[in-house]
Amino acid sequence: MDKLLLVKQLNFKARRGMKETSNIVRKLIDQVDDMTEQDLLELQKFINLDDQKMFDYIFKEREIFFREFSRLKKYFLI
């Protein structure tokens, strides 16, 4: 997939229903210029999660999150 198109799709999907998850996703989206295509695909998979699952991964199941989304760990700034 074209990287520019993927970035545009990710930007659109970055708008979340929960403030906490929106802030996390925005921080990741702000770093897309540094991401490889594989990183972007993993970010896309992460963004496709529903807000509650995303919240749980980030705030309750961090070890599972980093195992499931290992490529995003280096961009995760919380």
Image (cartoon, helix red, strand yellow):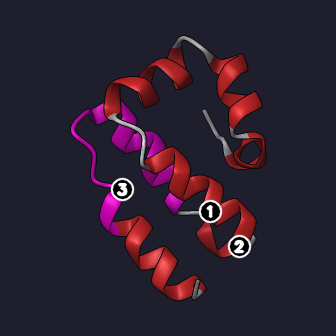
- In the rendered structure, which amino acid carries the disc numbered 2? Glu
> Disc 2 on helix, strand or loop?
helix
Q: For the point 57% across and 88% down, which residue is it?
A: 2
Q: CA distance from mark 3 to mark 1?
A: 14 Å
Instruction: State the image coordinates of residue 73 (x, y, percent, origin top left).
Output: 74, 41
Magenta stretch holds residue 37: no
From the image, state whether disc 3 or disc 1 is nearer to you: 1
Q: CA distance from mark 2 to mark 1?
A: 6 Å
Instruction: State the image coordinates of residue 20 (x, y, percent, origin top left).
Output: 36, 31
Where is mark 1, residue-wise? 41
- In the rendered structure, which amino acid carries the disc numbered 1? Leu
Q: Are marks 2 and 3 in contact (CB under 8 Å)?
A: no
Number of numbered discs present?
3
Q: For the point 72% across and 18% down, which residue is it?
A: 63
Which numbered disc covers residue 37?
2
Asked which quadrant contains residue 17, the reply is top left
Where is mark 3, residue-wise? 14
Instruction: State the image coordinates of residue 28 (x, y, percent, origin top left).
Output: 55, 53
Q: CA distance from mark 2 to mark 3?
A: 17 Å
Q: Are marks 3 and 1 in contact (CB under 8 Å)?
A: no
- In the rendered structure, which amino acid carries the disc numbered 3? Ala
Q: For the point 54% across and 11% down, which residue is it?
A: 60
Q: Which residues are magenta?
A: 12-29
- Label 3 or label 1, whichever comes before in sequence order: 3
Quarter of the figure that contains the C terminus: top right
Quarter of the figure that contains the N terminus: bottom right
